[in-house]
Amino acid sequence: MKGTFYFDPADRIYADHFPGRAVVPGSLIVHAFLQEAHRAEEFAGGRFLAEEFRFTEFIAPGTYSFTMETDKGRLRCRLYHEGKTVVTGFFKPE
């Protein structure tokens, strides 16, 4: 599955994370992926464990493309910024 996430720069959470240079918290990124995982047909409605999430750079609020694909019974998640992968991780069904 492919799509985009939009992290609204006007959201008040960014006023404190970090003042003067807003950064999307990693927990919000993982949660965005989790919401998409629940929409995936083969994983709909299930419970998941987040595994091996890695962040290669801070991302500012805005629009980012993502992919999720099945890989050995898990969902592989990738977030992209300017053509490069900035977040990777997996969801494993419980």
Image: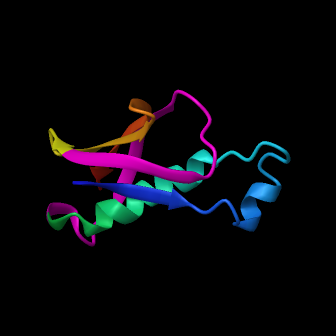
Which quadrant of the figure has residue 8?
A: bottom right
Q: What residue is drawn where x is 35% and y is 47%?
A: 66
- Percent x, y of residue 51: 40, 40
Which quadrant of the figure has residue 82?
A: top left
How is colour applied across the structure in the image?
rainbow
User: Where, quadrant-wise, is the N terminus in this rendering?
Assistant: bottom left
Residue 81 falls left or right of residue 47 = right
- Percent x, y of residue 87: 45, 36
User: Where, quadrant-wise, is the C terminus in this rendering?
Assistant: bottom left
- Percent x, y of residue 30: 48, 51
- Percent x, y of residue 25: 64, 48
Q: What residue is drawn where x is 15% and y is 38%?
A: 72
Residue 23 falls left or right of residue 63 = right
Q: What residue is drawn where x is 23% and y is 69%?
A: 44
Q: Is residue 6 above or below residue 49?
A: below
Q: Within the magenta stretch, is there residue 51?
A: yes
So how many labels did they put on this image?
0
Residue 91 falls left or right of residue 5 = left
Residue 47 visible from this viewpoint: no
Q: Within the magenta stretch, is there residue 53?
A: yes
Residues in magenta, as a range: 42-69
Q: Is residue 26 above or below residue 83?
A: below
